Image (tube, rainbow, N blue to C red):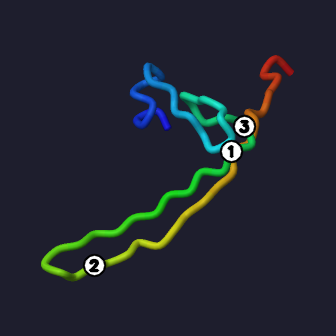
Amino acid sequence: MLEIAWNATKPVTLKGGETRSFIEDGDTVIMKGYSEKDGIRVGFGEVRGKVLPALNFDFDK
């Protein structure tokens, strides 16, 4: 998201009309990839994860 939004200088408009520059808590991030050369394509599958809120630790205890 940071790269697509050009380091938050060009927010991205999502399907629902919302504009965002960063991923947020509750977002699901999906990454897929493949490589192709000389007509041969190798896929790397898909990985997905949900962004959870940061944990608050009390290090003074």
Is 7 left or right of 59, judged from the image as shown? left
* C-alpha gap between disc 2 and disc 3: 34 Å
* C-alpha gap between disc 1 and disc 2: 30 Å
Q: Can you tell which of label 2 and label 3 is closer to the viewer?
A: 2
Assess whether mark 2 and mark 1 are in contact (beta carbons under 8 angstroms): no
Farthest residue in the left direction?
38
Q: Position of residue 46 (x, y in %)?
A: 52, 68
Farthest residue in the right direction?
61
Query: Circle 1: is it few (<14), some (14-19), or many (20+) Cα within 10 Å?
Result: few
Amino acid bearing label 2: Arg
* C-alpha gap between disc 3 and disc 1: 6 Å
Which residue occupies 34% across, 69% down?
A: 34
- Point out the tag, 2 or 3, that comes first from the N-terminus: 3
Amino acid bearing label 3: Asp
Query: Circle 3: is it few (<14), some (14-19), or many (20+) Cα within 10 Å?
Result: few
What residue is disc 3 on?
25
Q: Position of residue 8 (x, y in %)?
A: 48, 23
Closest to the observer, 60 or 37: 37
Q: Secondary structure at mark 3?
A: loop
What residue is disc 2 on?
41
Query: Circle 2: is it few (<14), some (14-19), or many (20+) Cα within 10 Å?
Result: few
Assess whether mark 1 and mark 3 are in contact (beta carbons under 8 angstroms): yes
Q: Secondary structure at mark 2?
A: strand
- Point out the tag, 1 or 2, that comes first from the N-terminus: 1
Q: Secondary structure at mark 1?
A: loop
Which residue occupies 45% across, 30% down?
A: 5
Which residue occupies 57% across, 31% down?
A: 22
Which residue occupies 69% across, 41% down?
A: 16
What residue is disc 1 on?
27
Q: Which quadrant does the C terminus fall into?
A: top right
Amino acid bearing label 1: Asp
What is the quadrant of residue 10 in the picture? top left
